[in-house]
Amino acid sequence: MADVKSGDSFYRLGALGRHRCLGRRALGRMAVFALLAGCVAGVPGDIGAGRATKAAPTTMALASGTVIITGPSGYCVDTSASQDNARGAFVLLGSCASLTASPSGRKPQNPAILTASVVAGSGDDAAFAASFPAMARFLSSSAGRAALSRSGQASSVQIVQITSVKDVMYIRASDRAAAKGQEVETEYWRALMSLNGKIITLSVLGLRNLPMKPDAKRRLLERFVARVRAANNG
Protein backbone atom coordinates (compact mmCIF):
# COMPACT_ATOMS: atom_id res chain seq x y z
CA MET A 1 0.00 0.00 0.00
CA ALA A 2 1.29 3.47 -0.90
CA ASP A 3 1.99 6.34 1.43
CA VAL A 4 0.79 9.91 1.08
CA LYS A 5 3.14 12.61 2.25
CA SER A 6 1.92 16.15 2.86
CA GLY A 7 4.47 18.50 4.32
CA ASP A 8 6.43 16.41 6.83
CA SER A 9 3.77 13.78 7.51
CA PHE A 10 3.00 10.44 5.89
CA TYR A 11 -0.53 9.07 5.79
CA ARG A 12 -1.46 5.51 4.96
CA LEU A 13 -3.90 5.55 2.05
CA GLY A 14 -6.01 2.91 3.78
CA ALA A 15 -6.61 5.33 6.63
CA LEU A 16 -8.10 7.89 4.26
CA GLY A 17 -11.04 5.65 3.42
CA ARG A 18 -12.17 4.22 0.11
CA HIS A 19 -12.88 6.43 -2.87
CA ARG A 20 -16.65 6.91 -3.12
CA CYS A 21 -17.57 10.37 -4.34
CA LEU A 22 -14.76 11.71 -6.54
CA GLY A 23 -17.12 11.76 -9.53
CA ARG A 24 -19.25 14.37 -7.73
CA ARG A 25 -16.38 16.80 -7.47
CA ALA A 26 -15.44 18.74 -10.60
CA LEU A 27 -11.84 19.28 -9.54
CA GLY A 28 -11.42 15.63 -8.75
CA ARG A 29 -12.74 14.65 -12.17
CA MET A 30 -10.40 17.07 -13.94
CA ALA A 31 -7.42 15.94 -11.90
CA VAL A 32 -7.99 12.26 -12.58
CA PHE A 33 -8.53 13.02 -16.28
CA ALA A 34 -5.21 14.86 -16.29
CA LEU A 35 -3.48 11.89 -14.70
CA LEU A 36 -4.89 9.54 -17.29
CA ALA A 37 -3.98 11.94 -20.08
CA GLY A 38 -0.43 11.82 -18.77
CA CYS A 39 -0.22 8.05 -19.06
CA VAL A 40 2.12 6.75 -21.71
CA ALA A 41 0.79 3.59 -23.33
CA GLY A 42 3.90 3.43 -25.46
CA VAL A 43 6.87 5.61 -26.33
CA PRO A 44 7.85 5.93 -29.99
CA GLY A 45 10.81 3.65 -30.88
CA ASP A 46 14.26 5.33 -30.43
CA ILE A 47 13.56 9.02 -30.04
CA GLY A 48 14.80 10.90 -33.07
CA ALA A 49 15.61 7.75 -35.06
CA GLY A 50 14.76 8.21 -38.71
CA ARG A 51 13.42 11.71 -38.14
CA ALA A 52 16.38 13.68 -36.82
CA THR A 53 16.48 17.37 -37.66
CA LYS A 54 19.28 19.92 -37.74
CA ALA A 55 17.74 21.65 -34.74
CA ALA A 56 15.32 20.49 -32.09
CA PRO A 57 13.46 23.12 -30.04
CA THR A 58 13.99 23.26 -26.30
CA THR A 59 10.51 24.68 -25.69
CA MET A 60 6.98 24.20 -27.01
CA ALA A 61 4.07 26.61 -26.56
CA LEU A 62 0.72 24.93 -25.91
CA ALA A 63 -2.93 25.87 -25.41
CA SER A 64 -2.76 28.97 -27.60
CA GLY A 65 0.48 30.04 -25.95
CA THR A 66 -0.86 29.98 -22.38
CA VAL A 67 1.55 27.22 -21.30
CA ILE A 68 5.22 26.73 -22.17
CA ILE A 69 6.84 23.32 -21.78
CA THR A 70 10.61 23.04 -21.48
CA GLY A 71 12.85 20.41 -19.95
CA PRO A 72 16.09 20.36 -17.97
CA SER A 73 19.40 21.01 -19.72
CA GLY A 74 20.11 18.56 -22.53
CA TYR A 75 16.46 17.79 -23.29
CA CYS A 76 14.70 18.89 -26.47
CA VAL A 77 11.18 18.49 -27.85
CA ASP A 78 10.44 15.67 -30.28
CA THR A 79 8.00 17.67 -32.41
CA SER A 80 6.99 14.67 -34.53
CA ALA A 81 5.71 12.84 -31.45
CA SER A 82 4.10 15.87 -29.76
CA GLN A 83 0.65 17.32 -30.39
CA ASP A 84 -1.61 20.17 -29.35
CA ASN A 85 -5.33 20.17 -30.12
CA ALA A 86 -8.70 21.05 -28.62
CA ARG A 87 -8.74 17.93 -26.43
CA GLY A 88 -5.40 18.73 -24.82
CA ALA A 89 -1.69 18.61 -25.51
CA PHE A 90 1.11 16.08 -25.22
CA VAL A 91 4.85 16.76 -25.45
CA LEU A 92 7.66 14.21 -25.67
CA LEU A 93 11.20 15.27 -24.76
CA GLY A 94 14.44 13.36 -25.27
CA SER A 95 18.15 13.92 -25.59
CA CYS A 96 18.95 16.87 -27.86
CA ALA A 97 21.88 14.88 -29.28
CA SER A 98 19.59 12.00 -30.24
CA LEU A 99 16.96 14.23 -31.77
CA THR A 100 19.48 16.12 -33.88
CA ALA A 101 21.60 13.02 -34.63
CA SER A 102 24.60 15.12 -33.71
CA PRO A 103 27.47 13.68 -31.62
CA SER A 104 28.23 17.22 -30.50
CA GLY A 105 24.64 17.93 -29.50
CA ARG A 106 23.71 18.58 -25.89
CA LYS A 107 23.18 15.46 -23.82
CA PRO A 108 21.31 15.33 -20.51
CA GLN A 109 23.20 14.32 -17.40
CA ASN A 110 20.60 11.62 -16.80
CA PRO A 111 19.20 10.23 -20.09
CA ALA A 112 15.50 9.45 -19.82
CA ILE A 113 12.20 10.07 -21.55
CA LEU A 114 10.22 13.07 -20.35
CA THR A 115 6.56 13.71 -21.14
CA ALA A 116 4.15 16.54 -20.47
CA SER A 117 0.40 16.71 -20.92
CA VAL A 118 -1.87 19.73 -20.59
CA VAL A 119 -5.65 19.78 -20.18
CA ALA A 120 -8.14 22.48 -19.20
CA GLY A 121 -8.38 23.24 -15.49
CA SER A 122 -10.50 25.33 -13.14
CA GLY A 123 -8.07 28.20 -12.75
CA ASP A 124 -8.17 27.81 -8.95
CA ASP A 125 -4.74 26.47 -8.02
CA ALA A 126 -5.49 26.30 -4.29
CA ALA A 127 -8.69 24.31 -4.79
CA PHE A 128 -6.86 21.98 -7.15
CA ALA A 129 -4.18 21.25 -4.56
CA ALA A 130 -6.92 20.59 -2.01
CA SER A 131 -8.16 17.74 -4.21
CA PHE A 132 -4.89 15.76 -3.81
CA PRO A 133 -6.23 13.47 -1.03
CA ALA A 134 -9.21 12.53 -3.22
CA MET A 135 -6.88 11.74 -6.11
CA ALA A 136 -4.68 9.63 -3.86
CA ARG A 137 -7.69 7.62 -2.71
CA PHE A 138 -8.78 7.03 -6.28
CA LEU A 139 -5.32 5.99 -7.45
CA SER A 140 -5.05 3.48 -4.63
CA SER A 141 -8.31 1.82 -5.66
CA SER A 142 -8.64 -0.99 -8.20
CA ALA A 143 -10.44 1.38 -10.58
CA GLY A 144 -7.65 3.92 -10.35
CA ARG A 145 -4.88 1.40 -10.91
CA ALA A 146 -6.78 -0.14 -13.83
CA ALA A 147 -7.14 3.31 -15.39
CA LEU A 148 -3.39 3.89 -15.09
CA SER A 149 -2.48 0.46 -16.47
CA ARG A 150 -1.27 0.13 -20.05
CA SER A 151 -3.22 -3.14 -20.23
CA GLY A 152 -6.28 -1.95 -18.32
CA GLN A 153 -5.55 -4.45 -15.54
CA ALA A 154 -5.28 -3.11 -12.00
CA SER A 155 -2.96 -5.97 -11.08
CA SER A 156 -0.21 -4.62 -13.36
CA VAL A 157 0.07 -1.31 -11.48
CA GLN A 158 1.52 -0.60 -8.06
CA ILE A 159 1.32 2.84 -6.48
CA VAL A 160 4.54 3.02 -4.48
CA GLN A 161 4.33 6.52 -3.03
CA ILE A 162 2.31 9.70 -3.36
CA THR A 163 3.92 12.90 -2.11
CA SER A 164 2.37 16.34 -1.87
CA VAL A 165 4.85 19.24 -1.78
CA LYS A 166 3.02 22.56 -1.60
CA ASP A 167 0.89 22.68 -4.78
CA VAL A 168 2.59 19.81 -6.64
CA MET A 169 1.60 16.17 -6.32
CA TYR A 170 4.32 13.57 -6.97
CA ILE A 171 3.43 9.98 -7.79
CA ARG A 172 5.84 7.06 -7.85
CA ALA A 173 4.28 4.05 -9.56
CA SER A 174 5.15 0.99 -11.60
CA ASP A 175 3.36 -0.74 -14.47
CA ARG A 176 4.40 -4.29 -15.38
CA ALA A 177 2.25 -4.29 -18.53
CA ALA A 178 4.22 -4.26 -21.78
CA ALA A 179 4.80 -0.86 -23.37
CA LYS A 180 4.75 -0.36 -27.11
CA GLY A 181 7.70 1.30 -28.79
CA GLN A 182 10.89 2.14 -26.95
CA GLU A 183 11.45 -0.03 -23.88
CA VAL A 184 11.17 1.82 -20.60
CA GLU A 185 11.54 0.80 -16.97
CA THR A 186 8.42 -0.38 -15.21
CA GLU A 187 8.74 2.25 -12.47
CA TYR A 188 8.28 5.96 -13.17
CA TRP A 189 7.69 9.27 -11.40
CA ARG A 190 4.93 11.72 -12.29
CA ALA A 191 4.06 15.24 -11.12
CA LEU A 192 0.70 16.98 -11.26
CA MET A 193 0.06 20.70 -10.82
CA SER A 194 -2.23 23.54 -11.86
CA LEU A 195 -0.66 26.43 -13.76
CA ASN A 196 -2.17 29.31 -15.74
CA GLY A 197 -5.61 27.73 -15.57
CA LYS A 198 -4.38 24.39 -16.95
CA ILE A 199 -3.69 21.04 -15.31
CA ILE A 200 -0.17 19.91 -16.19
CA THR A 201 1.19 16.39 -15.82
CA LEU A 202 4.95 15.84 -16.08
CA SER A 203 6.55 12.39 -16.16
CA VAL A 204 10.02 10.86 -16.06
CA LEU A 205 10.48 7.37 -17.52
CA GLY A 206 13.83 5.62 -17.34
CA LEU A 207 15.15 3.70 -20.34
CA ARG A 208 15.45 -0.02 -19.79
CA ASN A 209 18.98 -0.08 -21.22
CA LEU A 210 19.95 2.94 -19.10
CA PRO A 211 18.15 2.35 -15.79
CA MET A 212 17.88 5.11 -13.21
CA LYS A 213 17.48 4.84 -9.47
CA PRO A 214 14.11 6.06 -8.14
CA ASP A 215 15.72 9.00 -6.31
CA ALA A 216 17.47 10.09 -9.51
CA LYS A 217 14.16 10.05 -11.37
CA ARG A 218 12.56 12.11 -8.63
CA ARG A 219 15.35 14.70 -8.73
CA LEU A 220 15.08 14.91 -12.52
CA LEU A 221 11.31 15.37 -12.22
CA GLU A 222 11.78 18.15 -9.68
CA ARG A 223 14.11 19.93 -12.13
CA PHE A 224 11.51 19.42 -14.86
CA VAL A 225 8.83 20.98 -12.64
CA ALA A 226 11.11 23.92 -11.80
CA ARG A 227 11.91 24.55 -15.48
CA VAL A 228 8.25 24.54 -16.48
CA ARG A 229 7.35 26.87 -13.62
CA ALA A 230 10.12 29.30 -14.53
CA ALA A 231 9.09 29.28 -18.21
CA ASN A 232 5.54 30.22 -17.17
CA ASN A 233 6.58 32.81 -14.58
CA GLY A 234 5.39 30.42 -11.88
Image (cartoon, rainbow, N blue to C red):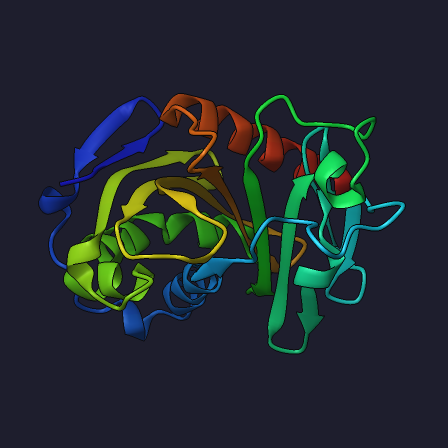
Judging depth in this view, the residue of 132 and 220 nearest the camera is: 220
Judging depth in this view, the residue of 55 and 115 nearest the camera is: 55
Residue 77: x %, y % from top left: 73, 48
Seen at 70% across and 68% down, the residue is 84
Residue 52: x %, y % from top left: 78, 50
Q: From where the camera sits, is residue 77 visible?
A: yes
Seen at 47% across and 34% down, the residue is 166
Q: From where the camera sits, is residue 19 visible?
A: no
Outermost right residue: 54
Residue 172: x %, y % from top left: 34, 39
Relative to residue 148, is residue 6 depicted above or below?
Answer: above
Q: How many marks?
A: 0
Q: Is residue 60 left or right of residue 184?
A: right
Outermost bottom residue: 86
Relative to residue 143, is residue 133 depicted above or below?
Answer: above
Seen at 63% across and 21% down, the residue is 109
Q: Is residue 231 left or right of residue 138?
A: right
Quarter location, residue 169: top left
Q: In this view, does 17 lie to the left or right of 227?
A: left
Quarter location, residue 211: top left
Judging depth in this view, the residue of 132 and 59 nearest the camera is: 59
- The quadrant in which the N terminus is found is top left
Residue 54: x %, y % from top left: 89, 46
Quarter location, residue 118: bottom right
- The quadrant in which the C terminus is found is top right
Relative to residue 189, is residue 152 depicted above or below?
Answer: below
Seen at 47% across and 38% down, the residue is 207
